[in-house]
Amino acid sequence: MDYAKYIPHPKTKFLRVKCSGCGNEQIIFSAPATSKVKCLVCEKDLAESTGSKLKLKSKVISILE
């Protein structure tokens, strides 16, 4: 019997995203933030909270597990 399907897995992950403005790669958390997530270099918006989900405004390079 495959018990792996009964083990709960988190719905949130860490994402490596790339800023479309300056090309900086940054790691962000996929859970909704209370404010906008900005690039650490050029301060362009990378993501914003929509209440229940995070709306990405940048390209996801990889998903870290």
Image (cartoon, grey):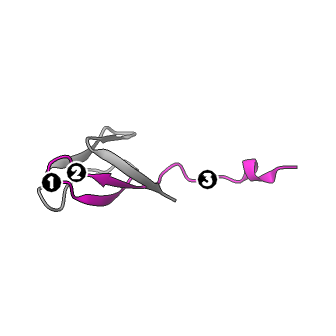
What residue is rendered at 23% in x and 50% in y?
A: 35
Regarding mark 2 in the picture, which secondary structure is present there? loop
Residue 56 magenta:
no
The residue lying toward the viewer, choosing from 41 and 55, is 41
What residue is rendered at 48% in x and 51% in y?
A: 12
What residue is rendered at 37% in x and 51% in y?
A: 61
Of badges 3 and 1, the one in the foreground is: 1
Residue type at mark 1 is: Cys
Of badges 2 and 3, the one in the foreground is: 2
Q: Which residue is mark 2?
A: 19
- Whether residue 54 sits left or right of residue 63 in the image: it is left
- Whether residue 9 sits left or right of residue 3 in the image: it is left
CA neighbours of label 3 inside 10 A, class few (<14), some (14 to 19), many (20+): few
Q: Are marks 1 and 2 in contact (CB under 8 Å)?
A: yes
Q: Which residue is mark 3?
A: 9
Residue type at mark 3 is: His
Q: Residue 63 placed where, x, y %?
A: 45, 53
CA neighbours of label 2 inside 10 A, class few (<14), some (14 to 19), many (20+): many
Task: Give how far apart the Cα atoms at labels 2 and 3 are.
Answer: 29 Å
Regarding mark 3 in the picture, which secondary structure is present there? loop
Q: Which residue is mark 1?
A: 22
Task: Give how far apart the Cα atoms at labels 1 and 2 are.
Answer: 6 Å
Q: Are marks 3 and 1 in contact (CB under 8 Å)?
A: no
What range of the chain is rendered magenta?
A: 1-29
Looking at the image, the residue that sits furthest to the right is 1
Sequence-earlier tag: 3 or 1: 3
Sequence-earlier tag: 2 or 3: 3
